[in-house]
Amino acid sequence: MNYYDDNTILYLDGRFVKAREAKVDLYTQSLHYGYSVFEGIRSYKTENGETKIFKATEHYQRLRISAEALNIPFDYTVEQLIDATYEVLKQNNLQDAYIRPLVYSPANMSFNKNAESHLVIAVWEMPLFFGDKLLKVMTSSFERPNPKAFKIHAKATGHYVNSILASQEAKANGFDEALLLDLNGYVAEGTGANVFFEKNKVLYTPAKGNILPGITRATVIELCNELNISVEESFFRPGKMKGADSCFYCGTAAEIVGLESLDNVPFKLKWEDSLGYVLQQAYKDLIREKNDADTNFIGQSSSVELLEAAVSDTTRAE
Ligand code: PMP
């Protein structure tokens, strides 16, 4: 995958610079210890042709919350970052894009706090993900990080070593992706996505505490409320999910993607007959701001509050 070429522009510490000319200090504490925070955001070309960053405020608030959780200086306002991102998209002539802001540390081989940080915002083309392909998922032998060992509500780069190990293990075993359990053996999430499953017309998703409570997860719950779909947040073991009616992963990059099977046990319903499919269509309309979507209001609704509630709830599941 080519993330950039000779013409690609980055936002780096307040300036717009060519990606090929941008430099990073090899002595940065971030590279050596996985000590930085980031976001994964998407922008879409809406029905009326405009470029819209989906849930921009929520993502940049989470970036600030992540930086604060890790004691990384963060001197930007959400508005500044949103403006800078629209400008980077414009300078790269992109609409359906993936946006990757990263806050990283200066040269520092100690574990001490830094007085400053760096911020880069990179963008690259990412077509819509929704496809027919359903995922074959295995229960990982890796657990999600223990909330008493990491600030797991923060999107910190170091946490993703866990995701890389789990994803590579799944692929080496012939699966598409992994499902990770929490420290208590309850279902937690995918390597970069939250999970929902359907049984008897009710959706279930792991409760907050041992997961990254995603912005897409919050959007799905809002859509469920709007569409009168019952959704329960609880702690459950993988046995409850296996052979259920249907199941899906959701996240900014993955959007909403159905699962074919868990540990080779298929989900019962055809994807097109599942609640996940209904939500996938509603989500598609929402991101594209389709006018006839009766869920358009959700884009301006209370998901900031939902997010803040999510990140402040770090209660452990017992
Ligand atoms: N869990 C993990 C571990 C993730 O990396 C992501 C992607 N950020 C998610 C869940 C989904 O989060 P969001 O919907 O905010 O992208």
Image (tube, rainbow, N blue to C red):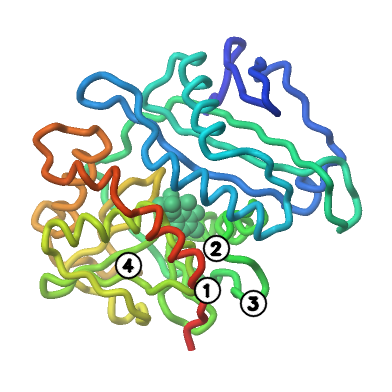
Other-residue count near label 4 (Cα within 10 Å), few / some / many at <14 / 14–19 / ≥20: many
The kind of residue tagged 4 is Leu
Q: Which residue is mark 4?
A: 262
The kind of residue tagged 1 is Thr
User: Measured from the top left, where is residue 191 in percent x and y?
Assistant: 48, 58
Visible in this render: residue 317? yes
Q: CA distance from mark 4 to mark 3?
A: 28 Å
Of circles 2 and 4, which is in front? 2
Nearest to the observer: residue 158 or residue 172? 158
Pointer 4 or 3: first along the chain: 3
Q: Residue furthest top?
A: 7
Residue at the image position 33 percent from the left and 79 percent from the top: 234
Assign a secondary structure to mark 1: loop
Could you say which disc has been placed on residue 148 in the image?
3
Q: Is residue 238 above or below residue 103?
A: below
The kind of residue tagged 3 is Lys
Assign a secondary structure to mark 3: loop
Other-residue count near label 2 (Cα within 10 Å), few / some / many at <14 / 14–19 / ≥20: many
79 relative to 226 in the view: left or right = right
Among the 4 quarters of the image, the one containing residue 202: bottom left
Q: Which residue is mark 2?
A: 153
